[in-house]
Amino acid sequence: MSQIVHLPDLQGNWKWPRRINPHTEEIRQESLDWAASFGAFSPRAQVAFDKCNFKQLRCSNDLMNLFFIVDEYSDKSSPSDVWDQVSISMDALRNPQKPRPEGEWVGGEATRQFWARTYPISTSTFHRRFIDSWEDYLHGVAQQAEDRHASYVRDVDSYLQVRRKTVGVIPSLNMLEMGMDIPDEVMEHPVIRELMSLGSDLVFISNDILSYNKEQASGDDQRNIVTIVMREQALGVQQAIDWAGQLHDSKTERFNELYLQIPRWGGPLDWEVQTFMHGVAQLVSGNVQWSYESERYLGKRGLEVRATGVLHLSPKYSMDEIGPVIMDETILG
């Protein structure tokens, strides 16, 4: 008989219900076709990919798909190969008009096309911030590959530092700024910085909780906060999930408190800041709902698990391949 665990209510105290972007079906198929055109996924993975229901403006969709291309390869590559992929992707981002070499990793051309499509319709402020955050994300992915290769399990504190990068929240949030020109002094304000950090933490904590069953079943749970807490504090799985849930609750409480302290700068800038920060809150909401509604982590029982909070842990087995699933547009609202 499988072990039963009870999941925390990850949205019980969250004040921002998910808002679905109205421009959904307009871009769904074209972005799906774009990502599939690179042949990055094996037939089995592509079947999972094609079943996804995702909605978002085209460039944001393409970024979500690009995340999955990076993940699909980095999860199976040596550290040196992943560092090569980092260099290729960054070169494509900085030189979107330069044709990619024949035979190169497909992520280079995917990055180039994504940026060639995004660059002309976005501000120079966005360009600078996205390039920096994308590089930070890729470096986190490479560090994770090194940890995996060395079978190195981090402690909680050092794991949090790497996970904040690999979860990809900051590049995703940057997409909210495509048409904005928010000054650095505003984005560097302590309240804004902490809210962004809290949003990132809330996304990866909920992601780790809801993905734990799939990852432990496939033997790929060494970079999951539940497993790390179990090892570091000698806890059982339910206790570790409860610990992660309490951490999520404390960060939710802090986010709710701090949101009311967002400064005012006056004029149109206040509207841009409020729009951006609302997007941060929507990202947190969308991530949780997507995790239940897609089949990536909980299979066909996601809605049941969301309603009951009860999860039957799967037995451990060998899984050669975990197919990608595309996030829908509610991730960015």
Image (tube, rainbow, N blue to C red):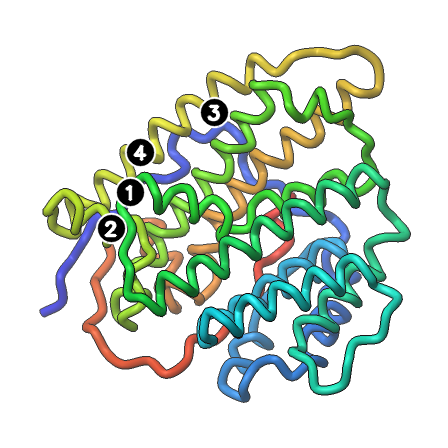
Task: Mark 2 or mark 1: name the one nearer the start of the chain.
Answer: 1
Residue underneath mark 4: 247
Q: Nearer the viewer, mark 3 or mark 1?
A: 1
Q: Amino acid at mark 2?
A: Ile
Task: Mark 2 or mark 4: name the one nearer the start of the chain.
Answer: 2
Q: Nearer the viewer, residue 216 or 231?
A: 231
Q: Quadrant of the N terminus?
A: bottom left
Is 106 situated above or below 179?
below
Give residue 46's position: percent from left, percent from top.
56, 81
Is 325 situated above or below 15?
below
Q: CA distance from mark 2 to mark 1?
A: 6 Å
Task: Mark 2 or mark 3: name the one nearer the start of the chain.
Answer: 2
Residue underneath mark 3: 255
Q: Amino acid at mark 1?
A: Val
Residue underneath mark 2: 228
Q: Amino acid at mark 4?
A: Leu
